[in-house]
Amino acid sequence: MLIHTENLRLLTCGIDHLESIVRDPKSLGALLNVSIPDGWPGYAQAYPHCLELLRREPLRALGGWWLYLFIHAHERALVGCGGFKSPPAKDGVVEIGYEIAPAFRGRGLEREAVTALLRFAFTRPEVTAVQALTPAKRGPETQPLEQAGMRMSGKAGDPQAGAVWVWRMTSDEFAHAVPRRAA
């Protein structure tokens, strides 16, 4: 699956991509014919888990509720990754997460990726809300969510990150916050 934005191509991360990342993240560059920036991936410890999950559930990525590689269309560089923690829960809520390589931060790509994930999620009728977790402080992690129209809706505890803020957007809020142009 491929999601297009003005500057990004969000490419579904497959087993071959994950094997490459786990083996040597720079080897992913040859596989995708893109440059891999220094400092990526920031969350390298997550990829072995993703690889095992996709090996156990090979169809998981087909529905789109999976991990995407963010490729800059003009610069032919992998700028980050992100996606959905899982398919929507029974109440229609889905959680997103993302990371942008240090060399590409502050250029609006974070907001562009978040908006693309929101747009993808809200085209699915079963999705009632999208949420994201960030450290419990304003900063570069929260800005793209705010720019995309998400709002901080509460606090929670995360076993790995400690105190976090919960960001949320409903389908009604999305309809008013995000322009409906093609993704």
Image (cartoon, rainbow, N blue to C red):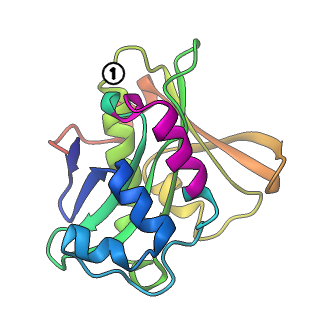
Question: In the depicted view, which residue is nearer to us: 25 or 73?
Answer: 25
Q: Is residue 155 above or below residue 86?
A: below
Range of residues picked out in magenta: 48-61
Q: Residue at x 45, y 87 (%)?
A: 38
> Relative to residue 175, is residue 119 depicted above or below?
below
Q: Quadrant of the C terminus?
A: top left
* 59 falls in the magenta region: yes
Q: Nearer the viewer, residue 105 or 63?
A: 63
Q: Residues within 10 Å of mark 1 (few under 14, many from 20)?
A: few
Q: Residue at x 42, y 50 (%)?
A: 148
Q: Which residue is mark 1?
A: 124
Q: In this rendering, would 148 be left or right of 160?
A: left
Considering only vertical position in the picture, is 157 above or below 110?
A: above
Q: How many marks?
A: 1
Helix, strand or loop at disc 1?
A: loop
Q: Amino acid at mark 1?
A: Arg
Q: Which residue is found at the position 50% from the left and 49% from the top? A: 51
Of residue 127 and residue 175, the one placed in the foreground of this image is 127
**Placement of the N terminus among the 4 image quadrants:** top left
Percent coordinates x, y for residue 165 in the rendering: 73, 49
The image quadrant that residue 46 belongs to is: bottom right
Closer to us: 51 or 147: 51
Residue 143: give x, y in percent of width and height: 54, 63
Residue at left offset 57%, top offset 72%: 42
User: Does the magenta-highlighted stretch encompass residue 97?
Assistant: no
Q: Main secondary structure of the magenta part?
A: helix
Rendered location of residue 141, percent (x, y) = 59, 64
